[in-house]
Image: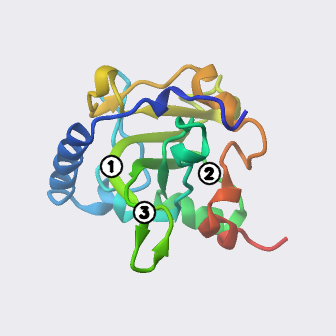
């Protein structure tokens, strides 16, 4: 099920994403970091807004599913730069559990070059999209594990500043198997290292 296509995998035009990211970054420098850190923000429509300071959170890993290892079309393209809000990371280190209010942000990045002076491999290319997941027992009481998933990629590759929760079948079903509390912790070495010993 992990390879099942998720609606967030639609290619997002790099220019559209870069412009939105630049705007989000600019806003981040105008307010205190602690004002938004660790908290999901919603607009009047109930749509999740891209966390403006997520790059100041904890970077937990960068799985990669290159197209050329997946018949030319990976279900999850291609690099995934994943961040967790700092407050939830601190709680996870203490308890080994993701607390209510946890926010994970995933940047999607294309594979760029496949060789460099250091050797052959997969090297990050252009930003191509962004997605997020939020654990909220009250707002998402009917969702498995109380997690909801959001894709900030609109139709025709248009970048979105906010997004509504995706249907359960669109993404949550992918996270119900072989995960820890609906999170692919096994792919994130920082979280594995942070988990308290039993």
Q: In x, y percent, where is residue 104?
A: 50, 49
Above or below, comparing residue 118 to residue 161 in the picture: below
Question: Is disc 2 in contact with disc 3, using a CB cutoff of under 8 Å?
Answer: no
Q: In x, y percent, where is residue 162?
A: 31, 31
Q: Which of marks 2 and 3 is in front?
A: 3
Q: How far apart are marks 2 and 1 (CA)?
A: 29 Å
* Left-right relation of 101 to 25: right
Above or below, comparing residue 120 to residue 142 in the picture: below
- Looking at the figure, which quarter contains the N terminus? top right
Q: How far apart are marks 1 and 3 (CA)?
A: 12 Å
Q: In x, y percent, where is residue 193?
A: 67, 73
Q: Which residue is drawn at 46% across and 41% down?
A: 132
Q: Distance between the residues labelled 2 and 3?
A: 33 Å
Q: Residue at x 27, y 32 (%)?
A: 159
- Observer able to see residue 82: yes
Label 2, on which residue?
99
Q: Please name the colour scheme applied to the rendered image.
A: rainbow
Label 1, on which residue?
127
Would you identify the image quadrant in which residue 173 lies?
A: top right
Above or below, comparing residue 155 to residue 31 in the picture: above
Q: Which residue is drawn at 52% across and 33% down?
A: 149
In what element is the residue under mark 3? Answer: loop
> Badge 3, how many Cα within 10 Å: few under 14, some, many 20+?
some
Q: Earlier in the sequence, mark 2 or mark 1?
A: 2
Label 3, on which residue?
123
Above or below, comparing residue 110 to residue 172 in the picture: below
* Left-right relation of 28 to 168: left
Would you identify the image quadrant in which residue 53 lies?
A: bottom left
In what element is the residue under mark 2? Answer: loop
In what element is the residue under mark 1? Answer: strand
Observer-nearest of 128 and 123: 123
Observer-nearest of 125 and 72: 72
């Amino acid at each position: 099920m992990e390879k099942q296509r998720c609606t967030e995998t639609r290619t997002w035009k790099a220019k559209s994403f870069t412009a939105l990211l630049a705007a989000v970054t600019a806003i981040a420098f105008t307010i205190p970091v602690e004002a938004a850190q660790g908290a999901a923000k919603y607009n009047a429509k109930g749509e999740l807004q891209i966390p403006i300071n997520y790059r100041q959170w904890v970077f937990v890993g960068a799985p990669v599913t290159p197209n050329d290892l997946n018949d030319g079309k990976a279900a999850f393209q291609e690099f995934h730069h994943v961040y967790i809000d700092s407050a939830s990371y601190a709680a996870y280190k203490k308890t080994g559990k993701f607390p209510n209010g946890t926010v994970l942000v995933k940047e999607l990045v294309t594979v760029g070059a496949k060789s460099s002076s250091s050797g052959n491999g997969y090297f990050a290319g252009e930003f191509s999209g962004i997605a997020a997941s939020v654990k909220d027992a009250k707002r998402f009481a009917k969702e498995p594990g109380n997690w909801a998933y959001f894709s900030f990629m609109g139709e025709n590759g248009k970048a979105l500043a906010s997004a509504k929760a995706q249907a359960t079948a669109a993404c949550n079903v992918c996270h119900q198997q072989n995960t820890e509390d609906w999170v692919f912790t096994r792919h994130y070495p920082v979280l594995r290292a942070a988990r308290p010993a039993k």
